[in-house]
Structures are given as structure tokens and as C-alpha cells.
Amino acid sequence: MKMSFLLPASVTQANAVQLERDGLLSLTTSGLIDCSGLQDFDSTVLTVLISWQKNLQARGLNLQMTGAPEKLTVLASVYGVSALLGLS
């Protein structure tokens, strides 16, 4: 069974840089992200997810998200990155 990286409840500019680093360290063999706990976020979360996706693709892997809240799907659509993030 693949291990997933659990996003915190809040993703903002205050924790985005550290979250991006933590995710890159954890996403070494799997691009599975658990978004089920995500509650408080803005477009900053898209920057983090896109960074992870680019890193994973460079290693022949893809980002896969589970439990994405509707707000995240809508936000990705507004910014035109739904397909890139697999949220379409």
C-alpha cells in the first residue's frame, strides 16, 4: 500500500515554504497526497502542489490527490491548473 502525504488543515503563505520542503522529502516514491484535512487555504496551496507535481514528473511520477475539498477543485479551475493537478 502506498503511503500518502497528509496536507495540514491550513496552507497559507506562513507555512507554504516549510510545507513544500516537507512534502518534497516525503514524496520520494509516491505522489499520493491526502487532502481530506485541508480546511483553511488560498491560492498558495496551488503553488505548493504545482511545485510537487513538477518535481514528481521530473522523476517519472505523478501527483495523485485524494479527499480534495470542493473549494480546492474550484480554485484550481479558476487558476486553470485543474488538469495539471489531476482535479478535472
Image (cartoon, rainbow, N blue to C red):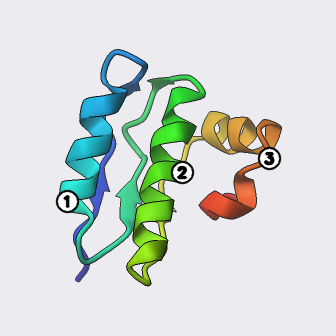
Ranked by sequence position, the earlier of labels 3 and 1 is 1
Hey, what amino acid is under mark 3? Answer: Gly
| Secondary element at tag 3 | loop
Q: Which residue is mark 3?
A: 80
In this view of the protein, which residue sits in the foreground, 12 or 7? 12
Left or right: residue 40 compared with residue 46: left
**Left or right: where does residue 4 sit relative to residue 48?**
left
Residue at 81 percent across and 36 percent down: it is 78
Sequence-first disc among 3 and 2:
2
Taking the spot 73% from the left edge, 62% from the top edge, the residue there is 83
Q: Residue at x 32, y 31 (%)?
A: 17
Please state if 3 lies on the left or on the right of 43 as rendered: left
Q: Which mark is residue 50?
A: 2
Q: Label 1 belongs to which residue?
A: 26
Using the image, determine if residue 25 lies above or below residue 7.
below
Residue 79 image offset from top left, x and y in percent: 76, 38
N-terminal of the two: label 2 or label 1? 1
